[in-house]
Amino acid sequence: MSRIGKKPITIPAGVSVEVNAENVVTVKGPKGTLSQEIDRDITVEINDNIVTLSRPTDQKRHKALHGLYRSLVNNMVVGVAEGFKKTLELVGVGYKATSQGKTLELNLGYSHSIFFGVPAEVEVKAETAKGKNPIVTLESADKQLLGQVTAKIKSLRPVEPYKGKGIREEGQYIRRKAGKTAAKK
């Protein structure tokens, strides 16, 4: 059995999970509503606030889908109950971030400002404290969308390995390289 796939998903209070005839799982909660289409081979059962997923055979494809869809449904349940949060740090001289509604304005050392439109499902906040790097906080109920938006923002100025300048997630380890002066010693 798939170790991830066979784990039951407990539904917290205030969250409802429904499965329709087309095998589409809809999860509703205080943070919003999410839905995911499940492969027709995987069966979803809801009993006493516990969601279980099962597969018909032990084929490699079914094993992979079993764990995948269990993780996706679990992420939806956690997302509508608690939500997900990512924090980005802008490291570099003169790097700035401001947010107005669903637009994030970034100054990343280019000759122009970058205006990034954030999807409606994602909340964005930008903070700049004196003497510290600007911080952009993204929150959403949809983990997949949040990761996609975070990756897109990080791609605007990837972290370079010599000085460590760029956009990184908070706590992300950056492998640094020695410059030319290290070779001369």
Image (cartoon, rainbow, N blue to C red):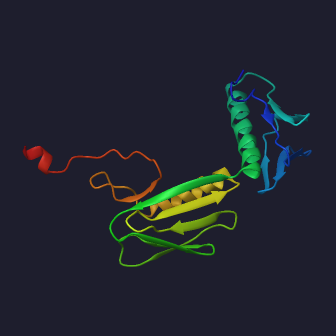
Residue lying at the far bottom of the rendered structure: 112
- When the figure is inspected, residue 45 is found, relative to residue 137, above or below; the finding is above
Question: In the picture, which quadrant includes the N terminus?
Answer: top right
- For the residue pair 166 and 24, the one nearer the viewer reads as 166
- For the residue pair 65 and 86, the one nearer the viewer reads as 86
Residue 173 horizontal side relative to residue 15, left or right = left
The mark tally for this picture is 0
Residue in the image at 37% along x and 55% along y: 159
Instruction: Give the image location of residue 88, x and y in percent.
Output: 49, 58
Residue lying at the far left of the rendered structure: 185
Quadrant of res 145 = bottom right
- When the figure is inspected, residue 100 is found, relative to residue 176, above or below; the finding is below
- For the residue pair 48 and 72, the one nearer the viewer reads as 48
Question: In the picture, which quadrant includes the C terminus?
Answer: top left
Instruction: Give the image location of residue 3, x and y in percent.
Output: 68, 24
Instruction: Give the image location of residue 33, x and y in percent.
Output: 80, 56
Quadrant of res 67 = top right
Residue in the image at 82% along x and 38% along y: 40
Residue 154 horizontal side relative to residue 24, left or right = left
- When the figure is inspected, residue 132 is found, relative to residue 179, above or below; the finding is below
Instruction: Give the image location of residue 87, x and y in percent.
Output: 53, 56
Residue in the image at 14% along x and 46% along y: 182
